[in-house]
Amino acid sequence: MKKIKIKIRYIILTVILLILAFNEGNRTLVRRILEQRKLNENIKSAQEQNNLLKERIYYLENEASYLERMVRSELNVIAPGEIEYRFSTKK
């Protein structure tokens, strides 16, 4: 009797899973949930990048040494009288 009840439960569970799997509405719902997760990750990444850029703008506006460091690193500018050393990476 116990084996029959267990088999009936498995059959009912299988039928429910098949109904959910082959129902277009449920598949659409799952796709939308996955899409929403991806969009939330994109939003979080954009917010982090926005915060970094805001911090960079703040330092550019308020710290002269930061501006000088950025110009030197991004534009490869050297001050008059400085000696620039370049190292070859070729072997």
Image: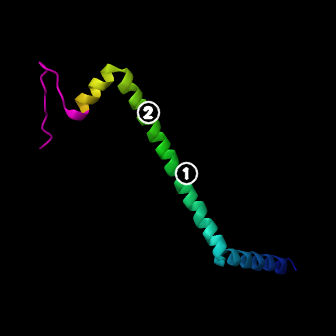
Q: What quarter of the picture does the C terminus occupy?
A: top left
Disc 1 designates what residue? 40
Farthest-out residue, right: 1
* 29 to the left or right of 35: right
Q: Which residue is drawn at 55% across and 51% down?
A: 40
Report x, y in % for residue 89: 15, 40
Q: Which of 28 and 89 is in front in this view?
A: 28
Classify residue 86 by image quadrant.
Answer: top left
Dominant secondary structure of the residues highlighted in magenta in the image: loop
Report x, y in % for residue 69: 28, 26
Crowding at dot 1, Cα within 10 Å, few <14 / some 14-19 / many 20+, comes out as few
Report x, y in % for residue 24: 64, 76
Farthest-out residue, top: 81
**Disc 2 from disc 1: Cα separation:** 21 Å
Residue numbers of the magenta segment: 74-91
* 52 to the left or right of 90: right
* 36 to the left or right of 52: right
Q: Which amino acid does label 1 sit on?
A: Asn
Work out whether mark 2 precedes mark 1 in sequence or the reverse, and give the earlier one.
1
For label 1, the SS is helix
Q: What residue type is labelled 2?
A: Lys
Q: Residue at x 30, y 25 (%)?
A: 67
Q: Residue at x 23, y 28 (%)?
A: 72
Q: Which residue is drawn at 68% across and 78% down?
A: 18
Report x, y in % for residue 30: 61, 66
Mark sitting on residue 54: 2
Q: What quarter of the picture does the N terminus occupy?
A: bottom right
